[in-house]
Amino acid sequence: MLFDMNRKDGGPHPSWRDLPDVPRWRRRPEAGVPPEFVMPPGLQAAVNAALLLRRPLLLTGPTGSGKSTLVELLAARLGLGEVLRWHITSKTTLNDGLFTYDALDRLHEIRLGNEGDRVERFVRLGPLGTALASPDRPRAVLVDEIDKSDIDLPGDLLNVLENFEFEIPPLLRALRPQGAGGPEGFWVKGADRQADIFYDVGDGKVRAAHYPVVVFTSNRERSFAPAFLRRCVRFTMPPITPELLGEIVAKHLHQGADVERAAIGEFAERIHAGEELAINQILELVYLVTGRNSEYIGGEDRQELARILLSELNAQ
């Protein structure tokens, strides 16, 4: 057992160095490295339609059904670089995705006599704004849980995507005519994990050189207006079957899928019966009770782990 409060044999307790590596599906995606993903029937056709039509792909399905993994796969296969992620809440506004402007920090810098006059220092592009400003290639954008948004946000988003451009008012106000002593153009930071990447936003108007690959995800917490739906290529993740779930587990854990076939089938039946469960729950159990990790798991521990890890997501 890795951690045992009741150990009495006098031996040394394990340290953090004895912890195994983070499971593969939990690691931060590496740009250009395709994640493990099982393409359900029909999804490839929807993806190709979205790419050819330059339409956003709206993926609908329960939590944990693999929706957000797809955009990582597309980015790696198409050479789109790091995925730009935008998680939506009920308070999210369109500007959160396009750009932010820290007026208070700028005022503070002005009072200190620092470079507060350089307004571009206080503007940062959001995930969608970064994608639209990308000069050399399309970027992939995950707009996660769009169904949690304010009612107007989906329509506002599509207006931007239809027009391929947006304005940054703080920069427009600071722009001066050529020769008038003011800045003639602006470079601002993007939403990339690498903090020193800047984008040329010219005169404060971003005009996209490339249409981004946009994937919306929805957990079916609300419906959308027909005007939004007709501008998206829509796909609903199919029901999980024992065969599909076994294939997903095998992708990540190889022989573990054969060893735990009964547990996988039982889990799939629970999903089919309407229980709110996520695929990562069975992945985590199989990961713990097979392979090297099984050395730490006894029979009683397995039953307790199954009870803990495989409980319904809406259970309190």
Image (cartoon, rainbow, N blue to C red):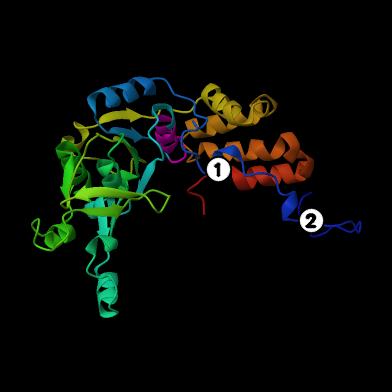
Q: Residues within 10 Å of mark 1 (few under 14, many from 20)?
A: few
Relative height, residue 110 to residue 177 (above, below): below
Place of residue 185 in the rendered image (x, y in percent of width and height, measured from the top left): 19, 53
The stretch drawn in magenta includes residue 34: no
Place of residue 312 in the rendered image (x, y in percent of width and height, measured from the top left): 52, 44
Q: Which type of secondary structure does the marked residue at label 2 adopt? A: loop
Place of residue 281 in the rendered image (x, y in percent of width and height, measured from the top left): 57, 40
Distance, label 1 to label 2, CA atoms, is: 27 Å
Quadrant position of residue 69: top left
Quadrant position of residue 26: top right
> Would you name the residue on which mark 2 appears?
4
Q: Residue furthest right?
A: 9
Q: Which type of secondary structure does the marked residue at label 1 adopt? A: loop
Numbered tag placed on residue 255 in the rendering:
none
What segment carries the magenta color? 63-75
Q: Amino acid at mark 2?
A: Asp
> Would you name the residue on which mark 1 appears?
27
Quadrant position of residue 154: top left
Most foreground residue, 280 or 70: 70
Relative height, residue 5 to residue 302 (above, below): below
